Each structure stands twice: as C-alpha cells, then as structure tokens.
C-alpha cells in the first residue's frame, strides 16, 4: 500500500436515536455520530415485525367476521335469508 493516500481508520461512538443504545465501530469518519435505528431496535432483527403483522391479520379477520355477522343479523331481521 502506498503511504499517505489512504484515509485514517479510527474508532468512533455511534448512538441510536430510537432506543439510545451506544456502540463503538471502526470507520474512516472523524467524529461520533447518530443513527436513526440500530440492530437492537430494528423490527427485522428483534422479531417484533412478525408479531405485529400477526396481530394485524387477526384484527382484520375479526373485523370481517363482525361485519359478516352484522349483515347476517340485518338480513334475518328483514325476513331475508
């Protein structure tokens, strides 16, 4: 490697603005910085994304069931079947 042409490699502190976690990484940046989301709070890494999607699917299903029951009761009330 040629001397003097490569950026200085150093360690900086990174802070997550979402959960407040801090960690040290090696980089060519010169100062500490913040990231909007990290691996400790990202849904893809924590598995919360799957849990939320299951809850949403169940809630949507229950809404459809409720609407179907309401329509059925209205039809029966009007004498239709």
Image (cartoon, rainbow, N blue to C red):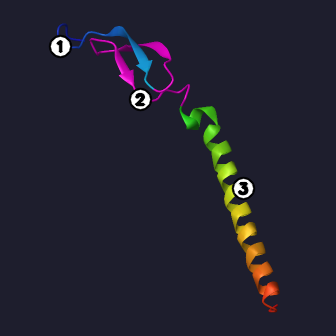
Mark 3 vs mark 1: in front: 3
Residue 66 x/y as whole percent: 74, 67
Q: Residue at x 48, y 19 (%)?
A: 20
Label 3, on which residue? 58
CA gap, disc 3 to disc 1? 58 Å
Question: What residue range appears in magenta?
Answer: 18-41
Q: Residues within 10 Å of mark 1 (few under 14, many from 20)?
A: few
Pick the front one: 79 or 27: 79
Residue 3 x/y as whole percent: 19, 7
Can you tell which quarter of the image residue 70 is in? bottom right
Prevailing secondary structure of the magenta residues: loop
Q: Secondary structure at mark 3?
A: helix
Label 2, on which residue? 36
Q: Which mark is residue 5?
A: 1
Quick check: 76 above or below 47? below
Pick the front one: 46 or 79: 79
Taking the image as shown, residue 64 lies to the left or right of residue 72, namely: left
Q: Secondary structure at mark 2?
A: loop
CA gap, disc 1 to disc 2? 32 Å
């Amino acid at each position: 490697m040629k001397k003097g042409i490569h950026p200085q490699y150093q360690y900086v502190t990174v802070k997550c603005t979402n959960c407040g976690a801090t960690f040290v990484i090696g980089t060519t940046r010169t100062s500490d910085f913040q990231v909007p989301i990290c691996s400790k709070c990202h849904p893809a890494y924590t598995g919360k994304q799957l849990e939320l999607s299951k809850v949403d699917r169940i809630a949507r299903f229950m809404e459809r069931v409720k609407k179907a029951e309401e329509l059925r009761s209205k039809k029966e009330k009007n004498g239709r079947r």
